[in-house]
Image (cartoon, rainbow, N blue to C red):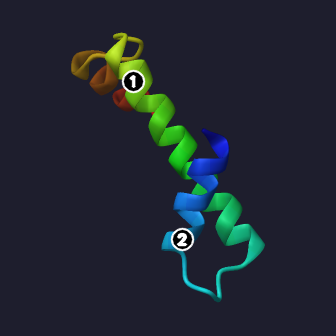
């Protein structure tokens, strides 16, 4: 799974991408996948809870 993710992410980046660019793209993709997984199991904040959190900032 990770190998496929790395191959997919790197194939979408330009040839001039730095190692940091690659790491950032992989990190972002993993975080997105984690967020989707969490939302599927209702682990997260509701819209109302999120609005309350933002108002505390």
Q: Nearer the viewer, residue 47 or 44?
A: 44
Task: Residue 42 in the image: state x and y as whole percent.
Answer: 34, 11
Point out the image quarter for the C terminus: top left
Residue tagged 2: 11
Q: Residues within 10 Å of mark 1 (few under 14, many from 20)?
A: few
Q: Residues within 10 Å of mark 2 (few under 14, many from 20)?
A: few
Mark 1: secondary structure: helix
Residue at image x 37%, y 31%?
54
Task: Residue 14 in the image: state x and y as whole percent.
Answer: 55, 83
Toward which corner of the image does residue 7 lie, by quadrant?
A: bottom right
Q: Nearer the viewer, residue 24 or 5?
A: 5
Task: Residue 22 in the image: state x and y as whole percent.
Answer: 67, 66
Q: Nearer the viewer, residue 42 or 17?
A: 17
What label does residue 53 carry, if any? Answer: 1
Q: Nearer the viewer, residue 20 or 9?
A: 9
Point out the image quarter for the N terminus: top right
Residue 16 is left or right of residue 8, and the answer is: right
């Amino acid at each position: 799974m990770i190998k496929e993710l790395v191959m997919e992410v790197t194939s979408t980046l330009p040839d001039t991408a730095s190692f940091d660019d690659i790491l950032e793209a992989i990190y972002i993709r993993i975080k997105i996948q984690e967020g989707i997984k969490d939302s599927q199991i209702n682990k997260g904040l509701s819209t109302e809870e999120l609005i309350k959190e933002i108002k505390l900032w």
